[in-house]
Amino acid sequence: DGGITQSPKYLFRKEGQNVTLSCEQNLNHDAMYWYRQDPGQGLRLIYYSQIVNDFQKGDIAEGYSVSREKKESFPLTVTSAQKNPTAFYLCASSISALSGNTIYFGEGSWLTVV
Amino acid sequence: QKEVEQDPGPLSVPEGAIVSLNCTYSNSAFQYFMWYRQYSRKGPELLMYTYSSGNKEDGRFTAQVDKSSKYISLFIRDSQPSDSATYLCAMSEGAQKLVFGQGTRLTINP
């Protein structure tokens, strides 16, 4: 089945550790995104990538890093510099960066700092 | 002022009722409007997609866009318990960056 796969579903991180969230899509979409969702704040864009080997910061990129070495993959690293990393993280993709393309989401990853 | 405002609710209605969910926005350049449904602890799924002003119907769901008032709505007819979820509006100017509302938590009571 075509779709977006995020892993792990649940992740616990100790303070001071970096963690990497995986996102893989088999939809042949060019564009990929990472969002963070906190209660009562909707979705906020962390990073996005329009094509392989290119990505741009979103609204809340500080403390996060990404790579886009393959079209199918867009991993997100939550670094120790992210002061409040506990949240629900959503990966998404769209056909291209052309106007009007809708975004499709994965099932999300829950990150908790312990 | 946020670019997109959405009443977070919660909204609770009896089964079979007509539900109206709304968003207002401030950016007159928005052209593409979407509604997503998100079940608890799941990723959002695209429900409705509308370009510019007008209405779009899909089964029990109707999306309305009024660009002159900067106001969009999602109507759910004959609401079912399975419609209980958080509904997110989203919109864009045409570039890939979507702006989301906060989401409205809806509960349909049997």
Image (spheres, coloured by chain):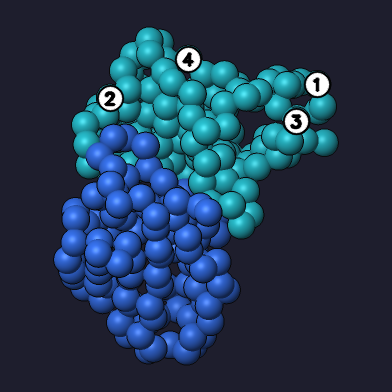
Chain colours: A cyan, B blue
For label 4, the SS is loop
Which residue is found at the position 41% from the left and 46% from the top? B99
Which residue is found at the position 70% from the left and 27% from the top? A82
> Which quarter of the rendered picture does the N terminus of chain A lie within?
top left
Q: Are marks 3 and 1 on the same chain?
A: yes
Q: Nearer the viewer, residue B1 or B81?
A: B1
- Mark 3 lies on residue: A83
Tell me how far mark 1 sits from mark 2, CA to CA. Answer: 33 Å
Indicate the chain on which mark 3 is placed: A
Tell me how far mark 2 sits from mark 4, CA to CA. Answer: 14 Å
- Mark 1 lies on residue: A16
For label 2, the SS is loop
Q: Is A38 situated left or right of A51 in this image?
A: right
> Which quarter of the rendered picture does the C terminus of chain A lie within?
top right
Tag 2–tag 4 contact (CB < 8 Å): no
For label 3, the SS is loop
Q: Are marks 1 and 2 on the same chain?
A: yes
